[in-house]
Amino acid sequence: MTANLRVAVVGSGFMGSLHARTVAECEIARLAAIVDSSEEAGRAAADAFSTEHISTVDDALSRKDIDAFIVAVPDRLHETAIPILEKGVPVLLEKPMAHDLPAAKRLAQAAEKAGAPLLVGHILRFDPRYVQAAAIVASGDIGDPIHATSGRLTVRDIGIRMNGTSSVCFYLGVHDVDLLQWLSGANVTKVFSRRVSKLMPSLGVQSEDAIFTVCEMENGLVGTLFFGWSLPSDIPTGIWSRSEVIGTKGVVDIDVRDHGLRVKDPGGWRLPDGLHWPEVNGRIAGDLREEVVHFVSAVQKQQPFVMPVDDALRAVAVNDAILRSCESGAQEAVEDWRL
């Protein structure tokens, strides 16, 4: 293994480009290539980051100058990572792990069989607010958890841009499905969900606007989840999110409607991102950088990742149950996600 991990990024869309820039700016990694089947998009991204464009994963796997991959393509294409994992090559796979549990299990099985390091990029696992909250609950400082809530709303532009290619449950809600279980320390066992679909269909988009869920959880906990892409486009911040755990002795509460920076200009109010991937002194910083640095460092040192594959599988299993409940109108059990 070289001193600087040579990383290829698969996908040159919004998240792929962010990952590529973060790797290019990382002191312990080198951006080896952009892999994209679109010649135009792939070459444009490669040129922007002064690296090479490769058309296919198979071509990239034949190279000797790539040590690891970041896969940042739409969730229904995440099995693109299977040939990489089958070669035993480390992968950082954007969340969600996959678009359904069978696909997620195939990814996990490929990684397990080949002994390939696999980190699913649940970025909030690298957010200091949520990391501290999970540690406080686990320490027992607020007593035994009684009930917990997690949810987020974003602007309708996201739903329009996705245009039915992913459910709000998988694109957005998977954050909160993971947070609810990680923060509370309990698994969701059953869900009862309802969706509303007024706005998106009126805009010609085959998607729900929002989903609301009541969860039965282990240890007698009750949980609630909500997520939607229904906020007006001119809301000053792109995300309204809230997570809380109520315990027998206290409360942990995370309220995220802005990141502490407010700007008023002729265009109105803006609340810029100050935590996920802000630009600081000309470089990407925040949670995304922490995620990429953790991936690179853990691979180099052969250490475990902070996000277990089981937790990523668990989130997909709960999402599947939520969508089944929306369809059936009944409570649905969460399938066993363990291999």
Image: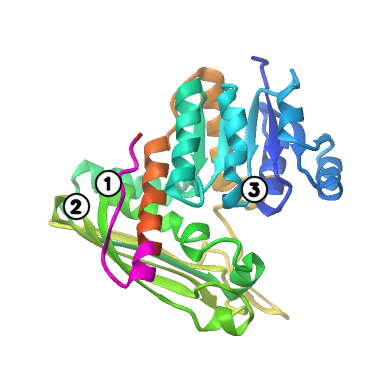
Q: Which mark is residue 136?
A: 1
- Of marks 1 and 2, which one's residue comes earlier in the chain? 1
As helix, strand or loop, the secondary structure at mark 3 comes to loop
156 or 28: nearer the viewer = 156
Spot occupied by residue 132 in the image (x, y as percentages of width and height):
36, 46
Span of residues in magenta: 324-338
Return the residue at label 2: 142
Colour pattern: rainbow
331 drawn magenta = yes
Q: Which mark is residue 185?
A: none
* Amino acid beneath label 1: Ile
Spot occupied by residue 259 in the image (x, y as percentages of width and height):
52, 61
Q: Which mark is residue 73?
A: 3
Visible residue check, residue 31: no
Q: Looking at the figure, which quarter contains the C terminus?
A: top left
11 drawn magenta = no
Visible residue check, residue 153: yes
239 or 261: nearer the viewer = 239
* Amino acid beneath label 2: Ile
- Of marks 2 and 3, which one's residue comes earlier in the chain? 3
